[in-house]
Image (cartoon, rainbow, N blue to C red):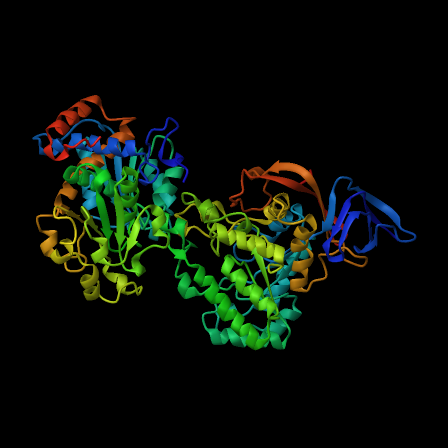
Amino acid sequence: MKPGLQFDDAGRLRHLLTIEGLSRQTIIEILDTAESFISMGEREIKKIPLLRGKTVVNLFFESSTRTRTTFEIAAKRLSADVINLNVDASSTSKGETLLDTIRNLEAMHTDLFIVRHAESGAAHMIARHVPPHVHIINAGDGRHAHPTQGLLDMFTIRRYKGAFEKLKVAIVGDILHSRVARSQIHALVTLGVAELRVVAPKTLLPTAVEMLGVRAFTRMEEGLDGVDVVMMLRLQRERMQGAHIPSEHEFFNLYGLTPAKLALAAKDAIVMHPGPMNRGLEIDSAVADGPQSVILPQVTYGIAVRMAVMALIMGGASEPPKYRDAQMSRAAKNPQRAGGRR
Amino acid sequence: MAGIVIQGGRLIDPAHAVDGKKDLYIDGNGFVVGVGKAPSGFKETKSIDARGLIVCPGLVDLRARLREPGLEYKATIESEVHAAVAAGITTLCCPPDTRPVIDTPAMAQMIQSRAWRFGKAFIHPLGALTQGLGGKLLADMEALDEAGCVGFTNALEPMTDTLVLRRALEYAATLDLTVFLHAEDPWLRNGGCVHEGEIGTRLGLPGIPEAAETVGVARDLALIEQTGCRAHFCNLSSNRAVAMIAEAIAHGLPVSADVTAHHLHLTEHDIGDFNTLCHVQPPLRGTHDRKGLRKALKTGVIRAICSDHQPHEPDAKLAPFAKSEPGISALETLLPLTLKLVDEKLLSLSEALALLTHNPAEIIGVETGHLGVGATADICIFDPEARWMLTEDKLISRGHNTPFLGWEFRGRVTYTLVGGKIVFEAGEN
């Protein structure tokens, strides 16, 4: 992949389309910036003027609650003006092309588009055709990428588990159709985890998935053995239709994360899920609501991470110094993050 | 007798194993009347100076979509025959997936008469194998054959019902017609848009497994064996399919196969980050597949290179990858990409030209593609040393959808003759 599209001529991040191609340094910078924004959510006044006067359009061609809402909150906390557009079928059904929709909104002087689309590569296509001052954040394109989800997952892992280099991580479920899995894989490989596994039946594993830098397992007993992080994926209930699985019942029996299966992982393993969860299909409620679950903190951190991404791509090369300072002092105080992470 | 003489060129005529400095004499009716020496009483009315140039039969392209009728916003017969002759192509086969479909003699004749009107390249239609390409009812093959169709195909529409395919092959065999097959299992294709492999996995694009092609080839070969129908496999994309065809040929089955020029040069990796210009059908596959296809040219399993020309309007490619329309505007890169294989020492010049001239002409049974005495003077003259870069302003085709922009080529067409008439001369497009 050409590194060009996401970066401007000076090598600064201009769009966030995929984690693939981001350096370890850039990912760490985003996580550190997010760290500085975490405390803001707990303050009385939850706003800073970083994006004052900027227009952000949440352009969702596919429905979403969590992602759209956290992007909206993130943009508002940075003082941007936010417009939500659910395009579902409205203009496209009238025959307008995706690019026409973008050009029309661009004519209204939008500064940042946050795009979700059912087709892989939609955000790339848009990024290739917008003028230099317009930024794109990919909020999920088909099966390809969901970079902010991947980054907030990294943020969550770092908060709870510290250094990536020692970790064994397993991603479980419908890898084939998952943009979340692809983003998680690129991030974890770049951050250099000790071992990265994917666990799924062969019908839900992509061809040649190993070349992404993972080990593929088809049995939970082997895949979860001794891992520090279990990342569950959502299974679309329609997957029986494509003959990927025989039934929800059988999938849960084989791949659903139950307390018994979780016991195969390390004692202090954390459990993650990008939501929305199918309780009783890919995850048992006892696990989802159990002590090892960090599923709700993932959502909370999503806001800070999305703020960090917007701040970085709209605000220039790096975060303002005062937030860096704030973050450094916080990092020193955070006991969970001791241990020579950097 | 009076006519044109092409002087001082290196004549390469693979059909007659000719490769040497020979002048070519063409009479007023457009036939070759002398090779190497003038027939008695020949008076030259015009002389083409071919010193330093290669003179070869005009190229025969087994598959080019001209978009007329039905999709004139993409291209027209007029626009595309200009592009063809500028690229040395003098004979084109047009698949039946026009709108309306070429499943009636009237449609077949209309396309040929449109081509004659412009007096550039010859266009031979391929007739529909089934009515409306629907895969259910056989088309009137005899009438279409009479109307000038050189073969029958369901184009890219799958023959889902195997019994209908069997009957179609039996019926074509009855009339001694050639059937052109795009072997692909539609169930395994399942809406895919790239090779099921590394790139599809990385980009999250639905893949078409190699098995979609091999299952299709296996089914079709079994029916060819049973029916005895002469068949031509279009557009092989995988190394395994090549091996299956090779085995069938070794067993004496009446089959031939072609490949596109782009499958010989590109792989799935050229898709990079969603380059829709590399969205083609069948998909670009892996490096070992490209290697297998190249080898098959050498062993003779693949007997023709075609352009599979599919010109598009710009919007067709301005969409997310899976939603973009497949195909490359490829007439003007057919000869350059084939000559690259000579530069890369895969083929001799004569072998390469055979794949573009005599062999495809034989597959469609049309009297062209060679330059013996008595042949139609369909001729391509090119400068083998001219180096140039493909840029958008150089394209004559209405379709600018090519992933080869910016590629450097060696070899440039300087003259094209069709039926003894100069239809293209470099420098006066």
The picture places residue A246, in percent across and down from the top left corner, at 25, 67
Along the line of sight, the residue nearer the viewer: A129 or B34: B34
- Residue A165: name its quadrant: top left
Question: How many dots with numbers?
Answer: 0
Residue B36 image position (x, y, % from top left): 84, 50
- Going by the image, does B328 lie left or right of A224? right
Residue B72 visible in the picture? no
Query: Relative to A135, does residue A67 appear above or below in the rendering?
Result: below
Question: Image point 53% across, 74% down: which residue?
Answer: B223
Q: Quadrant of the C terminus of chain B?
A: top right
Q: In front: A198, or B265?
A: A198
What is the x, y in percent for residue B108? 61, 64
Closer-to-camera residue (A141/B394): A141
Q: Which x, y percent locates residue B407? A: 56, 39
With respect to residue A291, does B358 lie above or below? below
The residue located at (56%, 74%) in the rendering is: B225
Left or right, residue B9 beside residue A36: right
Q: Residue sitting at 24 percent across and 55 percent down?
A: A173
**Visible residue check, residue A88:** yes
The reply, left or right, for residue A46 in relation to residue B238 is left
